Amino acid sequence: MKHFYFLIWGLFSAWAAYGQNCPTLAIPAVKISQVGHPNEAANASFCTGESVQLNALTGAVGVSYQWKRNGADVAGASGSSLVVNQAGEYSVTINQTGNCTGSAVSANTTISTNQCGSGGLLPILGGQLEDYNGSAELQSSVFLRAVYLTNTGSRNKFPLSIRAYVYRKRDNGLVTTVTMSRGSVLDGQYTPLPAACNGDSSKIQDVLYFGAINFQSAVYNDPGGYYVTTEPVCCREVSDNINGTGPVVFYMELGDRTKYNVTASHSTFGGIFGLPSRIETCVNQPVRLASYSYPSANLTRIQYSLVSPSTGDANTPVKDVGWATGYGASSFMESSSPLQIDQNGVITGTPTKVGTYRYVVKAELFQGAFKGFELRRELVIQVKECPAVTTPTVVVTAVGKPGQPAGNTLCENDAVQLNAKSPLKNVNYQWYLDGKVISGATDSVLISRQAGRYTVLVSKELACPRSAVSSPVSITVSPNPTVNLTVSNTTGALCQGGSLTLTAASTAAGATYRWQRDSTTLVGTTGPRYETGVAGNYLVSVTDANGCSGRSASLAVATNSPPDATILPAANTVCPGSVLRLQATTSNGATYQWLKDGTPVSGATSAVYDVSAAGMYSVVVRGANSCTATSGSKIVSTATLPTVSLSGPAQLCRNASATLTATGSSGTLQYLWLLDGSGLPGATTATYEAKKGGNYQVRVTDPNQCSAVSTNWPLAEIDKIDVRLDSIPPFCGIAGAPLQLVGTPVGGSFSGNGVSGTRFSPALAGVGTHEIIYTITGASACQSGTAKRTVLVRPLPEVNLPNLLKIQRGTSVNLPGPTGAAYQYNWSPPTGLDHSTIASPLASPDTSTTYRLVVQDQFGCTAEGRVLVSVSTQLYVPEIFTPNGDGHNDVWELRNAAHFKNVEVAVYNRWGVVVFHSIGYNEPFSGQNLPDGVYTYVIRYDSPAKRLAGTVIVTR
């Protein structure tokens, strides 16, 4: 189904395209112009920082555009023109829109940017690189001369020096670089050259640079020869047969120096080109372009041909330029017969298209079969139109109607159209008034509103002559006549059944008149007076003998119509004790009489009348033209007054606010509060927040604009009492005594955690932060209030000591006191402690001792605890000793023996023989004279007696 849908859609699209008869798109052309001026040509090569505009030329309609640079789309470049300031290859693609899907792509347009000096780009018409040495037989040098042909105004823009490069043809290897200096500027050297126009001449200037190549056989002996190029100099003048206007490179070739046979005196190694024969010619006329080369006397043969101009860049020192479509080296201009160059260097042909064309003549110079030198000269030829008659004429016609002739005299504020006629096509125009340029007048048509002598200059760059001026045409301006219109009736109004006379007074002689009423021409009235009885807007036009017309201002003639008698919109009710103003429409000179119930009201003769009672009212109006009219009736009734009452407190605390409420008789009332008789701005609701004392009222207004004011509501402003609660110091733990609370003024009540009556008990509150509130309850809000305090019951330091710690006499133990930030410690007694003011001192008492610890935190809160260190005594018997006399462990030391009574020690060898016996053990067993081995001991000590038995090892 999906494929079927695509098939149907494709058939539909094809049918739609067929139905539209989609045309085949022609390949668009690209024209380079000044930015914002698509008709003013610009160069494709320009200075960095400048811009040109590319314009797509196509006769197609309903197309979209996409510009590309170097093959990539230019973002947002979707119009028919593109402003560019970067070098690159530019093209434009046009695409048909709608159901047509055709597209066409232009050829690439090369844009180049150049680093320019203060003079900008150099307009180069042509030139060549040549050898002008006149004594080659004496000096082994090629004296280089670079000739740049330019226009008169640009010769001083050229740099003071350029470089030339000598390359080996075999491998394009650079042999040497030559600096060529500006030698001379010969103004008019190539003038006059025959121009396209008879009796005229064309000028070009040459700029010359000079340098030398030391043409030694030891260096220049490669059989393939050498070539010389100049550095790129920008830029070529615009021509129709070359893409772009890039840098110019001149080219020359040298042969193998060892093959030169220099025999002639005062000769060169190469040669030079002669003067150009012409740079202008006429279209459709045969042309003969002579490019003679003058070779060295040592060279015997010249071979001429046409080649492409040269250019170059940083990567490629020399390369051919790109030809525009349809052009090439041997077809550099459109000709009715093929272009040919003969062996004398003469080009013949008949140009068939106006334009500027660039070409290069190559001259190869031979000595027998040996090619010793090659010259190339680049030049342009301008093909111009040369009609028999080019003088333009000026035809005067009506504006917008070039086929309708007009006279040379025009009326004030009128215009005529001046039409320039020329036999040339695509020419430029410039109009002049009394010999001065008219700014912006560059069209073939000029609209003239000013007297004077008009001429037009018609010019065309490629025409002969380039410009021509028409004969003058004189235009005169006749002032328009004036006319004033007056009326016989000073009021300008018609009475019923009457008439008045209108009179036209004019400066025109022999004038005719045309009268109009309300833009309609009155037939048969051609005199200066007109009598009428019809109202309307009248004017008269007058035409003098020159046909110039003037017109009067419009004059309004009114009839005696009745005045407007209307009572303007107003309320239909009047409030008791008030008035309702009635207003009649007003007009100048009118008088008024008000009626109540059909009867005139005495003294009520102005445009306004204040009504205080119910009734039916109307007004009679008499206009300045004595016409009268009576208005319609206005029925006025008496309304009922609204009522309002106030409620709210009678007292206001100073620096506080109180809400007052107004209760009205209906829900459609408008409110305005008053204080001491003055209105309060913005107080327009049924409630009001009063912030000061005084007498308050409220004014209410109903939809009939009837209003009433409430009775007085006095609001007294009194001071608010100052309720305070004394500060409460913090407690250490919950064991402290209750604290008496103090609040002012007296008579209030206390509340909060730990509060009992007027006391605060930390035991009731517990550890933590507690809010205590003191409240005074009075007869009003100002006599009531609360005060608050925060009381802190701090926790005591935690002291958790064990009840008992056991040690052997002579050993120690750490007492495990608590740790905490900023705790202070005090152990007592200090006996047997290494420190008595640290958390965990080392205890080593001789006898059992109970230690007391007091801990104080950073707030001064203390806590204490106790621990009993029980000291016991035990006899320690070593299992080995070494009686080797080294001073270490030489005797069997029974530790703590001195603490016991009745100590008796016996030591046995393995056969049960007593080898040591002591009572009191004052002299330790030394093992002297005993062999190493294991011995058995029996120790009796203390009272009641205790017995220990075991073995001891004697070893050395």
Image (tube, helix red, strand yellow):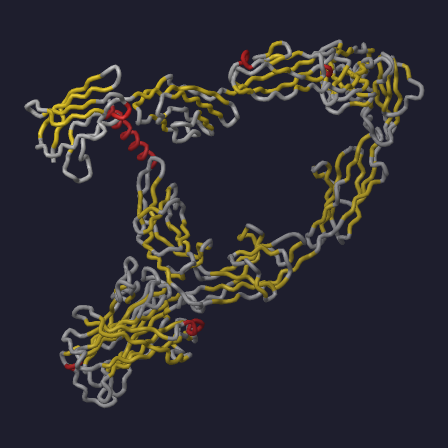
- Asked whether 621 or 69 is in front, the reply is 69
- Is any atom of residue 167 visible in this view? yes
Is 764 above or below relative to 899?
above
For residue 754, side relative to residue 830 (left or right): right
Which residue is at the far left? 911
Q: Position of residue 791 (x, y in %)?
A: 58, 19
Residue 804, quarter of picture: top left
- Asked whether 898 or 756 is in front, the reply is 898
Looking at the figure, which quarter contains the N terminus?
A: top left
- Asked whether 267 or 839 is in front, the reply is 839
Which residue is at the far right? 602
Residue 651, quarter of picture: top right
Residue 228, quarter of picture: bottom left
- Asked whether 339 or 172 is in front, the reply is 172
User: Could you tell me how many numbered marks the image carries?
Assistant: 0
Which residue shows up at 10% across the image and 27% down it?
Answer: 934
Looking at the figure, which quarter contains the C terminus?
A: top left
- Is any atom of residue 686 visible in this view? no
For residue 225, side relative to residue 811 (left or right): left
Q: Position of residue 562 (x, y in %)?
A: 82, 26
Q: Position of residue 908 (x, y in %)?
A: 11, 24
Q: Position of residue 676 (x, y in %)?
A: 82, 21
